[in-house]
Amino acid sequence: SAVISQKPSRDICQRGTSLTIQCQVDSQVTMMFWYRQQPGQSLTLIATANQGSEATYESGFVIDKFPISRPNLTFSTLTVSNMSPEDSSIYLCSVGGLHKNIQYFGAGTRLSVL
Amino acid sequence: TQLLEQSPQFLSIQEGENLTVYCNSSSVFSSLQWYRQEPGEGPVLLVTVVTGGEVKKLKRLTFQFGDARKDSSLHITAAQPGDTGLYLCAGASGTYKYIFGTGTRLKVLA
């Protein structure tokens, strides 16, 4: 399995500010993903973090709002920019490619925007 | 747009009861996964089903993939408080890219 560390685990932020979430994996992985989980709801894929190139965003998500970096095969960051209360969610990092059909998730970052 | 609808959305049962959670779509998926998520944690994979009609058992949990690979079910026998959590199905939409279902929140009372 993979051990995924996300930082911070939670944060309370002011409207208009930005927060960068880090995701560190204990082994090199092919695929890294970022998801959003709004309170009491399921997971929505934000983007696929590509190593060495721009992330691939899903419909409804844009780079200006959610810039993503992936400098190597074990690390990625997601920034939530110019936050509003509607951005209050759990943001989850996941990885794939270690084992067939298996995706591992971090514990998530619980974000509250005031 | 691929959608996965789960039912029921919420379920509260007594310890020892049986239950079934359904995951339905109009789309065909090459594989389907079931996850359980507990508060403050990320989802944890329970099972992956790949073949239409496939049935997999994991202790008291039985998973079935529909013949047409559009739906799946999760059956729990003799539920225990430790089974409490959010159950999510996810259909493969590409290489390691999954569409998650709407979720079923289960509470098992002692």
Image: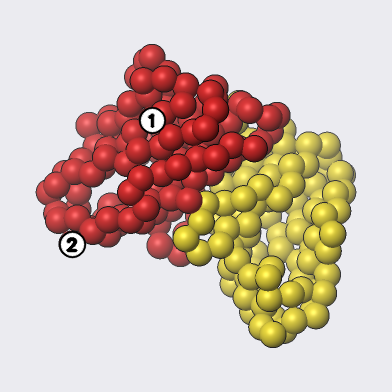
Q: Residue at x 69, y 68 (%)?
A: B83
Picture coordinates of residue B75, whole percent (x, y): 79, 63
Give the vertical position of A16 relative to A58 (above or below): below
Tell me how the rendering is colored: by chain
**Which picture quadrant has residue A7?**
top left
**Which picture quadrant has residue A10?**
bottom left
Q: Residue at x 70, y 42 (%)?
A: B32
Chain depicted in yellow = B
Chain depicted in red = A
Picture coordinates of residue B80, whole percent (x, y): 74, 75
Chain ID at mark 2: A
Q: Which residue is mark 1?
A: A76
Q: Which mark is residue A114?
A: 2
Amino acid type, label 2: Leu
Helix, strand or loop under label 2: loop
Picture coordinates of residue A37, whole percent (x, y): 43, 53
Q: Residue at x 80, y 60 (%)?
A: B61
Picture coordinates of residue B58, whole percent (x, y): 82, 55
